[in-house]
Image: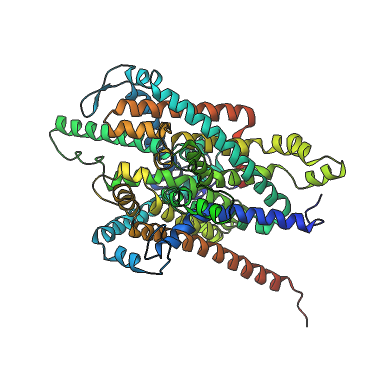
Amino acid sequence: MNDYENILLHRLKWTYLLLVVLTLMTPVIYVMYISFNANGFGANEYAFTLEFYGLIFSDELLIGALRWTLMLAVVVTLIAIPMALLAAKYYKAADNKLFPVFLLLAPLFVPPDILGSALLVFFKNLNLTFVWLGDQLGMSLFDSWFRLSFLTATIGLIIYTIPYSFVVILITMGRYHPEQTEAARACGANGWRAFWDIEFPQIRAGVFSACAFTVILVFNEYTRTSLLKGGFDTFTTVLISQMLNTGMSGQSYAMSALVSFVAIAAIGSIIIFTMLRAETLSRVARAKAEPVMS
Amino acid sequence: MSNPLTDMADGDTFPVGLQKKAPLRERLVPWAFRAPLVFMLLFFAFPMAMTVVFSVFERTMFWMEPGFTLFSYENFFFSARLVNFLNSMKYSVISVVICFAFGFPIAVFVRKSIPQIAQHRVVLLFILPFMVSEIIRVFALRPVLQRNGLINTTLLDLGIIDEPITALLYTHTGVVIGEVLSFLPFIVFSGFLAMEAVPKFIFEVCDDLGVGPWRRFKDVILPLAAPGIFAGSVFIFVNGLGVALLPNILGGAGAVNAGLIATQAITALDFPLAMAVSAIMMTTLMTLLWVGHRLFDLTKILTPLS
């Protein structure tokens, strides 16, 4: 039966869909609710407060961790997005698509603890090999290349985020007609100009969405970062160590809620931006399509 | 058709025989497109393959040294770890079935009944929970599931139960609940991509032929959408086996999966054992993907994106 013939059934299905989204969000919403309660979790009386949020911003350890996290997010985004873009262009042109798609999407299927452990041991061995190489050559130039550090955390996070940005960019590229590049080349544009002036403006939304996803994923990531980061702390590693050591305090709830607020605001902005942009574009297209009345 | 691998190179063309050698910069451009693959080969495929080699190294006090021993595998296969691993497989399968039962109908509904222009926006709704850190979502489940948590207080207030349900947390049930809430969006995404292979007119044809919903699902939708369903299921199954924080935070005694065994081995400085667990997980994953590819051709999932 067609859903539109049975409007009640259609509404029921919508209700179910929204209920599932709400269920998935319930733990996060509940944490947000508790984070504003001065009496904490499980209290009979609810007293609204912003005190725990104030504590976050007065904690120097947390502010330092936040700085590292943002730096990591920016560096990973600056490297992973151009890589995903190049990979998507390669995939579109490749005759054998199985190999690139397998290599680029496989990290999605590898659990974080397994990937993190494998990279940890790999980098430790690589570092030992480089130190040995340096000893043989009588120099210390190679000694700290692959010691657990910002670099190893960055590599681990690029591997983690690249499948997501690759898919997001590929989706937007699917709507681009390559004939436009051919036309630009026929008009004398070189490869870079054809890409930058013709193709990029049309896939820009996908590239920026991929940037936003990458920043959020890096900001939220715990397992791979904690295994590969070396001597610094990120926002989530501080949060989790606090939770594991002292249990869920008011500040832990506020930190969890804050991260969730930022992520939801970012993804919400993307949804609203794409909806408004689609609306604007369709309005422009409709205006162009209207017959000129003289 | 233009080829991006050569298009980006800014070169003139010369008649055959008179072709001058392109400058180094232009010859390097096609390789720039291969750079991400080279990076993934070096820092993803190679380290994952090396887990097999490291797993047969000999354990030392704080590290490991080259050698050949199967002690780590013995340590895994002839101990309680194997029982825990097999148990986590069982609970992962349960999670896959629950995720499919709750998530796949959503993918069918979105493809079948929502106008095409709005479909991607509806799917974006499922990205929303996924964008909040998994570890925060899992930690956040504790105040929801525990004895005086949201579920128990709500059910007590409504008079549905007389005593709080204690089986929701620190049990295998808690782990399954965590897996379902963590991974359900993936079956919606993969189902959504898979349903691209089921044209809308198929539903009308089935209606015209008087085919019931169950037969339509079993004989038409399932075979056509199989690659996407399989990919989503493998993702949930493997992550159920490998994400350590789920049994760590929500499970009780005996709730141990491969990821937790690997992280516990690293904490105990038993690196060969951690690598053996990683190698076993990779073998499981590769076998599943190979079987799936032979049966359903998994590249079909990305056809709509190409």
Q: How is the image coloured?
A: rainbow
- Name which quarter of the figure residue B82 lies in: top left
Q: Is residue B73 left or right of residue A294?
A: left
Q: Residue furthest right?
A: B209
Specify whether residue B92 is in view. yes
Q: Is residue A145 above or below residue B149?
A: above
Q: From the viewer's perspective, is residue B232 above or below residue A249?
A: above
Q: Nearer the viewer, residue B222 or A62?
A: A62
Estimate the x, y position of residue A33 in percent, counting from the top left. 45, 62
For the point 14% across and 37% down, the residue is A139
Q: Residue at 78% of width from left, 83% of height from top?
A: A294
**Left or right side of B92 for A52:** left
- Image-quadrant location for residue B78: top left
Q: How many numbered circles does the render carry? A: 0
Residue A224 is situated, as x and y percent measured from the top left of the image, at 36, 43
- Residue A233, position as x, y percentages in the image: 28, 51
Q: Residue at x 68, y 56 (%)?
A: A14
Q: Position of residue A263 (x, y in %)?
A: 45, 59
